[in-house]
Image (cartoon, rainbow, N blue to C red):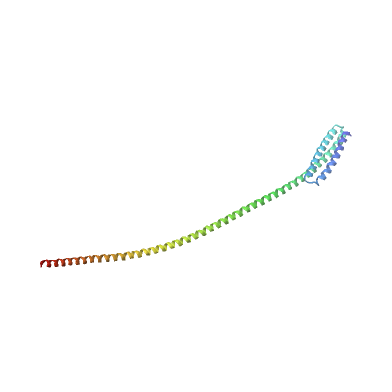
Amino acid sequence: MSAVFEGYEKQYCELSANLSKKCSSASLLDGEQKKQKISEIKSGLDTAEALIRKMDLEARGLQPNIKAVLLAKLREYKSDLNNLKSEVKRIASANLDQAARDDLLEAGMANTLAVSANQRDRLLMSTERLNNSSNRIMESRKVMLETEELGVSLLHDLHQQRQSLLHANNTMHGVDDNIGRSKKIISNISRRMDRNKWIIGAVITVLVIAIAVILYFKLSK
């Protein structure tokens, strides 16, 4: 058997045992420590794979009977290396799943906080709208009351104006009656004045005739 092959084989066996221990310890870790341990294991797997390639090259250069035995060992080492790779993938996958769960949990909490904030904002907006609506209703009610008071005041003023117009109408009727009576009185006075004029004219005429007669008789004597 080749001494070079045996040297590679010894290094591989020690490395494989070390990697198995690291896989066992990595499965118990979490977070950054687990990521660091997985990184170390992957680096060791690269070294182990390089050792297997060197053993394969060394075995193929030996005699056929020795080569067959060494290649059989290499198949076992390759199977062992594949098992280690599978174990590392499983551990890394579990780590990714945990990280994904943590991210999902953080995202869920963030979404919950965002939803709560949105709900709070919507609630505040709804409360503000309700307050604005209440204020508008109060203002509308105030305007309605003021309008009602104005309407009552206008009706009262119109009633007073109606009473004033009725009183003025009655006053006008009274004035018309007074004017009518005044016209009648003036007419009567005018008729009396005309009659008095005729009487005075007649009296003056009689006096003139009497004076003329008296003068005639006096002058005749």
Coordinates of residue 35 in the picture (x, y in percent)? 78, 43
- Establish if 107 lies above or below 12: below
Name the side, left or right, on which 174 lies relative to 30. left
Coordinates of residue 6 in the picture (x, y in percent)? 88, 36
Residue 126 appears in which quarter of the rendering?
bottom right
Instruction: Say which quadrant the C terminus sits in.
Output: bottom left
- Establish if 59 lies above or below 170: above
- Establish if 66 lies above or below 105: above
Q: Visible in this render: residue 131?
A: yes
- Between 30 and 164, the residue placed more toward the observer is 164
Residue 84 appears in which quarter of the rendering?
top right
> Which residue is drawn at the image coordinates 60% and 54% (left, top)?
128
- Between 150 and 40, the residue placed more toward the observer is 150
Name the side, left or right, on which 109 lies relative to 60. left
- Between 34 and 135, the residue placed more toward the observer is 135
Coordinates of residue 150 in the picture (x, y in percent)? 48, 59
Instruction: Say which quadrant the N terminus sits in.
Output: top right
Residue 214 appears in which quarter of the rendering?
bottom left
Q: Visible in this render: residue 65?
A: no
Name the side, left or right, on which 160 lies relative to 179. right
> Which residue is drawn at the image coordinates 86% and 40% (left, top)?
14
> Which residue is drawn at the image coordinates 86% and 37% (left, top)?
11
- Between 115 and 194, the residue placed more toward the observer is 194
Coordinates of residue 177 in the picture (x, y in percent)? 33, 65
Q: Residue farthest to the left?
A: 221
How many marks are shown on the rendered structure? 0
